[in-house]
Amino acid sequence: MVIQELGWDDDVDDELRVAIEDTIDADLVDGEYGNVVEAVVLWWRDDDGDLVDALVDALTDLVGGGAIWLLTPKVGRSGSVDPADIAEAAPVAGLSQTTTAAVSKDWAATRLVAPKTVH
């Protein structure tokens, strides 16, 4: 499994990163990878810019059926993102929100997927 990591900065949870790499038995790839990936881990803070643009960019290398895990600082932490902002941005980017969970002391994860198309 190939997982792309976007939005990395000094404040990310390195223990979570290592746990992901251990689970997939591979390193995370960055935005320069240039091939398809099964999932994207997007670290996002309130002051990082336009969330819709970031989500659309995250879809670039994502294989059909893949997921974006949007990691945001938990409510009350510096850079926390209002859940309403995520709920508003996801459908504009063509995504549906499926799951939200606390994944570390400081970060929460929201799983976003492209809606299934009916043929």
Image (cartoon, rainbow, N blue to C red):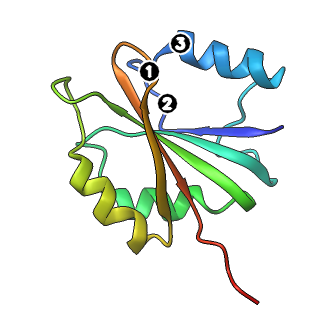
Which residue bears the numbered disc 2? Answer: 8
Q: Position of residue 42 (x, y in %)?
A: 50, 41
The image quadrant where one finds the N terminus is top right
Q: Position of residue 23 (x, y in %)?
A: 76, 20
Which residue bears the numbered disc 1? Answer: 12
**Callout 3 environment at 10 Å: few (<14), some (14 to 19), or many (20+)?**
few
Precedes in sequence: disc 2 or disc 3: 2
Q: CA distance from mark 1 to mark 2?
A: 6 Å
Q: CA distance from mark 2 to mark 3?
A: 10 Å
Q: Amino acid at mark 2?
A: Trp
Q: Are marks 1 and 3 in contact (CB under 8 Å)?
A: yes
- In the current view of this chain or complex, which residue is farthest to the bottom? 119
**Callout 1 environment at 10 Å: few (<14), some (14 to 19), or many (20+)?**
some
Q: Position of residue 81 (x, y in %)?
A: 24, 42
What is the secondary structure assignment of the residue under circle 2? loop
Q: Are marks 2 and 3 in contact (CB under 8 Å)?
A: no
**Callout 2 environment at 10 Å: few (<14), some (14 to 19), or many (20+)?**
few
Q: Are marks 1 and 2 in contact (CB under 8 Å)?
A: yes
Instruction: Residue at 31% x, 29% y: name it.
Output: 73
What is the secondary structure assignment of the residue under circle 1? loop
* Image position of 64 (left or right of 9): right
Placement of 38 over or under 44, stated as above or below: below
The image quadrant where one finds the C terminus is bottom right
Q: Amino acid at mark 1?
A: Val
What is the secondary structure assignment of the residue under circle 3? helix
Which residue bears the numbered disc 3? Answer: 14
Q: Position of residue 111 (x, y in %)?
A: 51, 46
